[in-house]
Image: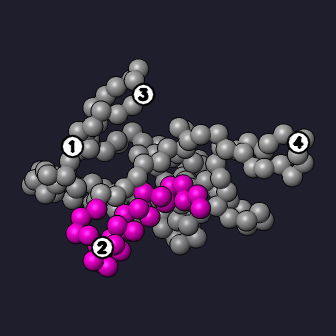
Amino acid sequence: MDRQCGSGLDAIALASRLVAAGGNGVFLAGGVESISTAPLRARRNPDPDGEPDFYTRATFVPPGFGDPDMGVAAENVARECGVSREQQDGFAVRSHERAVAARAAGAFASEIVPLEAGAPWCRRMTDPGHPSRPDSWPAFRRHSYRAAL
């Protein structure tokens, strides 16, 4: 099964279940997915002499149900549930303020480790406490419900 973006969360859920079942006391679980660095994928062509059908992103649902990208799906859910852009922005600001306060209080000091990230020709140290970006703009649609982070 190709869990794609859910694979890291599945690994954490499995580790949690193993701890709860008495398997061990400590597990290291997580994951990182990046569609931009994923290998090429192809569907098998029923014609043995035919070309493979290459794709960049696997579908999540059977044909006929629609299969929007995650950002567009989030837009659709926000619209259908009546969650405005202003409500989302307010939640994001409160969440950011709480995270900054918790970090300043040392709540995550033993968990936050700067990591070198990026390709060999573009190295940088990540800063998990970077400030929010006030210059973010709608990422998926004009007058979007969601902003790029």
Q: Quadrant of the N terminus?
A: bottom right
Q: Secondary structure at mark 3?
A: loop
Which of the colour schemes (rainbow, by chain, secondary structure, one colour) is used?
A: one colour
Whichever of callouts 2 and 1 sits on the residue coming sooner in the sequence is 2
Whichever of callouts 2 and 3 sits on the residue coming sooner in the sequence is 2
In the picture, the disc for residue 50 is 4
Q: Amino acid at mark 2?
A: Gly
CB-based contact (under 8 Å), mark 1 and mark 4:
no
Mark nearest the camera among 4 and 3 is 4
Q: Amino acid at mark 3?
A: Ala
In the picture, the disc for residue 23 is 2
Whichever of callouts 4 and 2 sits on the residue coming sooner in the sequence is 2
In depth, the one of 66 and 45 nearer the eye is 45
What residue occupies the far front of the structure in this picture? Answer: 23
Circle 3 is placed at which residue position?
A: 119
Whichever of callouts 1 and 3 sits on the residue coming sooner in the sequence is 1
Look at the image and tell me whether residue 75 can be seen. no
